[in-house]
Amino acid sequence: MSTHAKSQARTNGRAAPHTPLWSRPGYLVRRVHQNHTALFTEECKAYGITPVQYGVLTALLHRPGIDQATLGAEVGIDRTNAADVLERLAERGLVRREKSGADRRMMLADLTAEGRSLTREMQGAMQRAQERLLEVLNPAERKSFMRQLLKLVDALGAPPAEPARPHAVEGDAGARRARRQATR
């Protein structure tokens, strides 16, 4: 069965045409992201690490001792979420945090020996998830797809520090819970 046929809904045993959602880039990017998250979770389930947590671990492996704000910008999460992710990783003994000697308001993060070991150990599982995500593309399409993604990310820059949250009110426990879930 073709990929196109697999992605179409069934109505009375026949493939139904896609809705207008399928012509919207944001919708398609979200669908690809959902699939990547599922593949990553499947490949990396033995480690109990989410894609965002692995991004933080990877960033710290390559940029040890960076501050939380810089780390958040590198991984694409805000400072508050970066602090939450770092706290969870620190509880597992994978990360250590300390106040900067130059600016006591700034928290610096680094991997522990266990964190470095786990990040390297997970590399193969993470790579399998990436390969599975792109397996329907031939090598030239993969290069082109990656080039286009980088172009979009570079052109769009960083999202606002606090993305708009419809229906979320300051102090709303549901909004806080949703933010925590998004970073797990």
Image (cartoon, grey):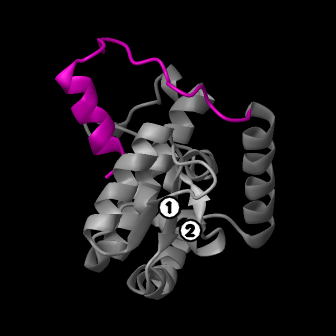
Mark 1 surroundings: few (<14), some (14-19) or many (≥20) residues within 10 A: many
Residue depicted at x 56% and y 68%: 60
Measured from the top left, where is residue 6 in percent x and y? 42, 52
Magenta stretch encompasses residue 35:
no
Residue assigned mark 1: 56
Q: Is residue 23 above or below residue 54?
A: above
Measured from the top left, where is residue 122 in percent x and y? 44, 81
Foreground pick, 67 / 26: 67
For label 1, the SS is helix
> Do the CB atoms of the residues marked 2 and 1 lie less than 8 Å apart?
yes
- Say what amino acid the circle numbered 2 marks: Leu
Q: Residues in magenta?
A: 157-184
| Residue at the outermost left position | 173
Residue assigned mark 2: 60
Q: Is residue 17 above or below residue 69?
A: above
The answer to whether residue 175 is left or right of residue 32 is: left
Q: Quadrant of residue 155?
A: top right
Residue depicted at x 75% and y 71%: 139
For label 2, the SS is helix
